Image: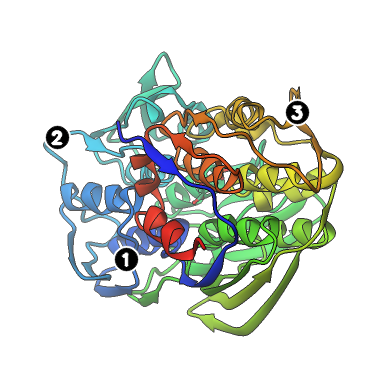
Amino acid sequence: MMIQEVLPVSRFSGTVTVPPDKSISHRAALFAALSEEESTIENYSDAADPQSTLACLRQLGVSATQAGDRVVIRGVGRDGFTIPEQPLDCGNSGTTMRLLGGIVAGAGVSCTLTGDESLSARTMKRIMDPLLEMGCRIRGREGRFAPLTVDRHKGVKEISFPLPIASAQLKSAVLLAGLFGEKPTEVVEKVQSRDHTERLLGLRCEPSPAGTVIRSSREDVIPAQNYRIPGDFSAASFWLAAGSILAGSELTLRNVGMNPTRTAALQILEEMGADFRVINQRSEGREPVADIEVRSAKLRAVKPDPSLVPNCIDELPILMVAMCFAGGSSVISGAEELRHKETDRLSAMEEILRRAGASVEAKPDGLVIHGRTDFRPLGAEYPTWHDHRMAMSAAILASASDKPSLIQGAECTAISYPAFWDHLTFLSQ
Ligand code: S3P
């Protein structure tokens, strides 16, 4: 286990290009594999999670070659996967297991999906239930956990599935299995979660009184494409918070994905009084992109509307760090999904913030953080539970201390942001 020392930082300054978006990287690779021809993906992530997706695709007989950040994938079409000889190892990646799970279950490819200790403790029942209803054959340990075993079936039946939780992974798993059905499967989404799957596949979306209806079937053509992956907004959010909390900071973040279903953290930071500017807005393929400049500001407490939670689910931990430096009591509610991530992120953040000396109260679905504009974190040793976002949140918190701190298991940042520690050193003054 790598223990990383984080030294006090007086301010953050400089320019950084954030790593390629993890969610879009997974999808570009999976959808390229489902097409019938060759696709190229520029700026593919070298982080561990998207690399797990590539490795699994190779085991399914898909040629995926990477040179630098360019990946070339030769699609095998919906019915061209080969039965893998070994279990498909999804590593730490929930997106790999849930999205690829939808694909292999829909295709009826006999295989087993495994994951690391953290992934094997996360429920997969949420995808198994609708997949079983569609006639797919999928089993799990204790009926809900990986390893998942998938078998051949007699055809995918269409279903109409009201999403019981705002989860893009669940939505995507059902829509991807739906691609194998003769008649359209529909997912009805009340609270919008990230929409990369619909965008990249160009799926039919329609408003209805019950929510947005998204449909997929065998009739949806999946073309080979030249994808270019934007920078990861979730990675950028660490620097948005870092630049906001340390007086005198000035950061420029380049090539940040600005998909509106991902950027609720900007709304929350704005309400907190953060000083940032979104510039050079453009689009990369079907996704909006921009650069962001951020300067430090005096922050105030905020009570984000629970409806914003799905659109900032991965940014909530670092927002909690920012809330420690915001005058007054911030209240996060409606975020029980955080308990089902790589670790229970509500309990983990409560522990991290307490170790820093912050005043926090736990709630079943969130946290109350009593912040102070003159907050100085204590020097501390932080556990990270092998969760990349816990390690990066603790690191930004620790930088604002006037004493050194230690981050346990620091290597886990490579799951989404391999250059994180280098960028931290580079931007620290
Ligand atoms: C993801 C969706 C989110 C997010 C995860 C990536 C995706 O999970 O937390 O990091 O790529 O679809 P849920 O959709 O399950 O909330």
Which residue is at a point 24% across and 65% down the rendered structure image?
A: 75
Q: Earlier in the sequence, mark 2 or mark 1?
A: 1
62 displayed left or right of 425: left
Q: Nearer the viewer, residue 319 or 395?
A: 395
Total numbered circles: 3
Residue type pointed to by label 3: Val
Q: Which residue is mark 2?
A: 86
Question: Is 83 located above or below residue 35 in the figure?
Answer: above
Q: Earlier in the sequence, mark 3 or mark 2?
A: 2
The answer, for residue 254, to whether it is visible in the render is yes
Q: Earlier in the sequence, mark 1 or mark 3?
A: 1
User: Of helix, strand and loop, which one carries label 1?
Assistant: helix
Q: Which residue is mark 1?
A: 32
The answer, for residue 218, to whether it is visible in the render is no
User: Is the Cβ of the residue at disc 1 closer than 8 Å to that at disc 3?
Assistant: no
Which residue is at a point 64% across and 75% down the rendered structure image?
A: 293
